[in-house]
Image (spheres, helix red, strand yellow):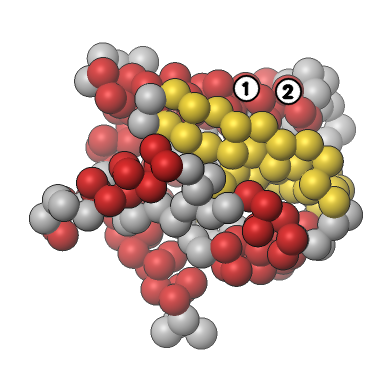
Amino acid sequence: MASTPFHARRDALETYFDRTAAQAWEQLTSDAPVSGVRATVRAGRDRMRGTLLDWMGADLRGARLLDAGCGTGALSIEAAARGADVVAIDIAGNLVDVARRRAGGLPIDWRVGDMLDPALGHFDFVVAMDSLIHYRAQDIAATAAALGARTQALLFTIAPRTPALTAMHAVGKLFPRGDRSPAIEPVAPARLKAMLPGNVRREMRVTSGFYISHALELRP
């Protein structure tokens, strides 16, 4: 299993987010000043996070939620503030440490590990915001099937295949290999939806400068 493209990419992501870019992501997800390009990414992520939270509702008391790929924890913290019982997991331990410090004592179950671990149990909501954008369509579909089997509603985002995103992806390949982040994998939403189990209840795209992300809500 460890030799599959999916697991090889996951290992690369762990190295990048846990070591190479941990400090950069801590800054991006804070309120510290950032460059114009990063400001567009921050604004887009804020808008996407707000969308996913609104899809789940303002009152989440009694709901169990898995934040699959929680990063520095912004969605987990806001969901917990709405009353959700949150399990937040990420492969990057350094980012989880940042999230734990930012949580201010909120009762969130922070974990470092695999979002697909069946021992995590069942949830009312599973959210994977921008944690699947580095994978191919078939891997996203397989992950959605695994997570969807353990929840009433799976909310996740993909990098939609658009001319702008394709151009950004091509430009990124011009940087020296050691300076690159793990490449995103632009996916055609229509093609992916045909591969998904369950029903796509709603979807929405957020475009903010260098941030382009497409959210889907999948129901059994």
Which is more toward the observer, 69 or 188?
Answer: 188
In the rendered view, does 195 fall on the left or right side of 140?
A: right
Quadrant assignment, res 201? top right
Label of residue 54 in the image? 2
Residue 94 locus on image (x, y percent): 35, 46
Q: Is residue 136 something one can see in this rendering?
A: yes
Identified at 32% across, 56% down, the residue is: 182
Identify the residue under disc 1: 50
Residue 175 locus on image (x, y percent): 14, 51
Check disc 2 and report its element: helix, strand or loop. Answer: helix
Identified at 80% across, 24% down, the residue is: 57
Task: Give the residue type that dot 1 points to.
Answer: Gly
In the rendered image, the vertical position of residue 200 relative to residue 215, given as above or below: below
Identified at 66% across, 68% down, the residue is: 142
The quadrant the C terminus occupies is bottom right
In the rendered image, the vertical position of residue 31 relative to residue 175, given as above or below: above
Quadrant assignment, res 140? bottom right
Which is more toward the observer, 151 or 197?
Answer: 197
Residue 165 locus on image (x, y percent): 40, 42
Q: Is residue 104 something one can see in this rendering?
A: no
In the rendered view, does 200 fall on the left or right side of 119?
A: right
Identified at 86% across, 33% down, the residue is: 62
Check disc 1 and report its element: helix, strand or loop. Answer: helix
In the rendered view, does 3 fall on the left or right side of 65?
A: left
Which is more toward the observer, 166 or 28?
Answer: 166
Task: Give the residue type that dot 2 points to.
Answer: Asp
Residue 83 locus on image (x, y percent): 76, 25
